Image (tube, grey):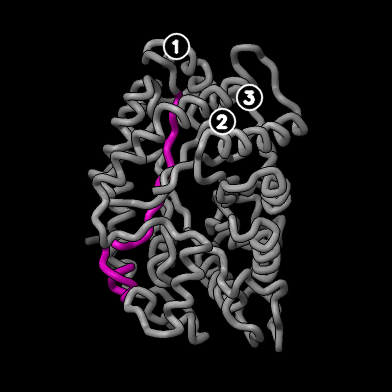
């Protein structure tokens, strides 16, 4: 089980002081937070991708490369990489380069993006979001697995005899998660390729998350990648902790009440009841997080959102100390004791290299070829009926 944090890179006014950090401060704080995550023993740091104010999360590979040069162990990921508005050739090149620079400490999460104006800024139509995600990822999948690619699609110029450089480290592409809050089509795409599915899990009730993950698991098995409980699942979450719950609620309430995303809506108490947001003691966070397994099954990655809503850097670093010292060690122990032997661990570069070596000597049912491996077009089928089961 991997534990880590993700950031959306928002620049938000601190409601308790009225001060808004500069873009420079927020960018440098992101680096400090990532380094702290490694220091306290977390496994993953992930950054989102936004191209509009009030976010500073553009150019994620630049950020991750800079962090990678100052860390040694932590896996660097995204939350998310925009597969719709970013050219798949550029993604192939940038993340393969990052993979080399970090000695394999990189994976990434594909997503459509939910900010409408961004699409025309990059010459795309949001009404084509799903077809863009399907076609662009099909091309990316080939670019990382074929040395020479001939390709023609609907949304970009054709490729003739094209080789993406550099080639993936050790001949193994970075592992891909497909991230979504509410799109069953993205769960279908993840299942089709046998990739991971990451449910953001921060704005929706448990019943919604349960349905989305269950859809992905069913379709993962349908496409022949293994049993449903062997599918690779990740979850998001939001927490704020102090030694006792009263202090946590009192300190976090003004940030919640004024947050651009969920502020001025349901109360902190109602939102905490309806979603995975947990504001309280470390023990309450442990108990709530362990409860996720009850409705999604055994899963491989848990990421927490810690640096949002205007929380000052000092407070975020304190939160990471609590997470790393008091929460994650218990979660690791408990989840390890509960996990059946046949359920895989979260993929890493080392495990993918080992699997690739094994596949050269025998064919594993869990790595069955998909139509995309043979260059066929990707048209996920059966989605509508799965949605209504």
Q: What span is colored magenta in the figure?
A: 220-240
Q: CA distance from mark 2 to mark 1?
A: 17 Å
- In primary-sequence order, the first of circles 2 and 1 is 1
Q: Position of residue 45 (x, y in %)?
A: 56, 44
Q: Position of residue 119 (x, y in %)?
A: 64, 57
Is 12 displayed left or right of 277 in the figure?
right
Q: CA distance from mark 1 to mark 3?
A: 18 Å
Residue under label 3, please give it. Answer: 313
| Circle 2 crowding by C-alpha within 10 Å: few under 14, some 14–19, many from 20 | many
Residue under label 1, please give it. Answer: 250
| Helix, strand or loop under label 3 | helix
Which of the numbered marks, if any, corresponds to residue 308?
Answer: 2
Residue 49 appearing in the image: yes
| Helix, strand or loop under label 2 | loop
Q: Position of residue 380 (x, y in %)?
A: 40, 73
Is 114 displayed left or right of 121 in the figure?
left
| Helix, strand or loop under label 1 | helix
Residue 231 within the magenta-colored segment of the rendering = yes
Q: Choose top left, top right, bottom left or bottom right for residue 381.
A: bottom left
Q: Residue at x 70, y 63 (%)?
A: 97
């Amino acid at each position: 089980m991997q534990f880590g944090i993700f950031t959306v890179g928002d620049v938000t006014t601190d409601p308790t002081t009225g001060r808004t950090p500069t873009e420079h401060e927020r960018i440098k704080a992101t680096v400090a937070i990532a380094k702290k995550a490694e220091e306290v023993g977390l496994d993953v740091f992930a950054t989102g991708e936004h191209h509009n104010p009030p976010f500073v999360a553009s150019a994620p590979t630049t950020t991750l490369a800079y962090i990678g040069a100052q860390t040694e162990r932590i896996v660097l990921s995204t939350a998310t990489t925009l597969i719709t508005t970013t050219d798949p050739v550029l993604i192939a090149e940038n993340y393969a380069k990052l993979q080399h620079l970090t000695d394999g400490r990189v994976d990434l999460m594909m997503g459509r993006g939910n900010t409408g104006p961004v699409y025309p800024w990059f010459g795309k139509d949001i009404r084509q979001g799903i077809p863009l995600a399907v076609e662009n990822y099909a091309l990316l999948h080939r670019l990382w697995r074929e040395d020479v690619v001939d390709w023609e699609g609907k949304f970009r110029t054709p490729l003739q005899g094209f080789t993406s450089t550099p080639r993936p480290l050790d001949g193994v592409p970075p592992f891909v998660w497909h991230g979504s809050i509410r799109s069953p089509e993205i769960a279908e795409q993840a299942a089709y390729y046998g990739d991971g599915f990451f449910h953001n899990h921060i704005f929706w009730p448990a019943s919604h998350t349960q349905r989305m993950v269950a859809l992905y698991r069913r379709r993962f098995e349908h496409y022949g990648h293994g049993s449903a409980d062997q599918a690779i699942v990740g979850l998001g979450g939001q927490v704020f902790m102090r030694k006792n719950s009263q202090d946590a609620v009192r300190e976090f309430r003004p940030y919640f009440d004024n947050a651009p995303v969920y502020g001025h809506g349901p109360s902190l108490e109602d939102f905490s009841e309806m979603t995975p947001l947990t504001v309280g003691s470390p023990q309450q966070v442990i108990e709530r997080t362990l409860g996720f397994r009850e409705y999604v099954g055994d899963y491989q990655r848990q990421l927490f959102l810690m640096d949002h809503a205007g929380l000052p850097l000092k407070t975020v670093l304190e939160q990471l100390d609590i997470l790393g010292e008091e929460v994650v060690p218990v979660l690791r122990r408990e989840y390890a004791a509960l996990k059946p032997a046949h359920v895989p661990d979260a993929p890493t570069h080392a495990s993918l290299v080992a699997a690739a070596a094994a596949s050269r000597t025998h064919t594993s049912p869990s790595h069955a070829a998909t139509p995309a491996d043979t260059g066929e077009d990707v048209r996920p089928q059966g989605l509508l009926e799965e949605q209504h089961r």
